[in-house]
Amino acid sequence: MSMKELKIPAGSAMFIGAPARPMDQRISIEIGKLTDSIDGIFEAHLPQLFVPEVMEEPAQVLVVILRQNANLKEIADELGSGLSRVLPEGAHLDLWPIPLGHQMVDDVRRTGCLI
């Protein structure tokens, strides 16, 4: 399983919404259990996201909303380890960590993709 952190430059055009073809519900449930077990994560979502010039094509992305003072490296390490057990071999999932209070939190929540 490969996971990479999305780095989205300020002012980038972004399209976010519910995925047209969401991943298998059993997998998203397991990802939800994993994110619930990590202290620094306030909530997690699996919307579809497309950022031209950052992403090749629209994809379902793991958005984690981080608690204040969360350690992103530790969270990413725990997620990487846990996702390797949850996702099918060869699967890829981008990670977009954002702090609680970020201007995009409401947009992410409006997608209805909370896990």
Image (cartoon, rainbow, N blue to C red):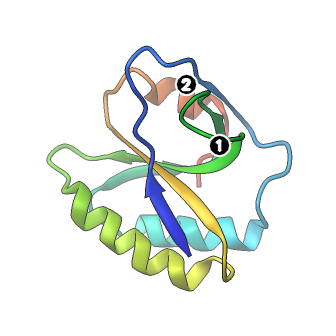
Q: Secondary structure at mark 1?
A: loop
- For the image, the number of numbered tags is 2
The disc labelled 1 sits on which kind of residue? Answer: Pro
The disc labelled 2 sits on which kind of residue? Answer: Asp
Q: Residue at x 44, y 64 (%)?
A: 35
Question: In this figure, which residue is indicated by the disc labeled 2?
Answer: 107
- Residue 114 visible to an observer of this rendering: yes
Q: Farthest residue toward the left?
A: 69
Above or below, 3 relative to 111: below
Number of other residues with Cα within 10 Å of mark 2, as a class: few under 14, some 14 to 19, many 20 or more: few
In this rendering, position of residue 9 left or right of residue 114: left
Question: In this figure, which residue is indicated by the disc labeled 1?
Answer: 47
Q: Residue at x 56, y 17 (%)?
A: 13
Which quadrant of the rendered structure holds the C terminus? Answer: bottom right
Does label 2 or label 1 sit earlier along the sequence?
1
Q: Secondary structure at mark 2?
A: helix
Disc 2/disc 1 C-alpha distance (Å): 10 Å
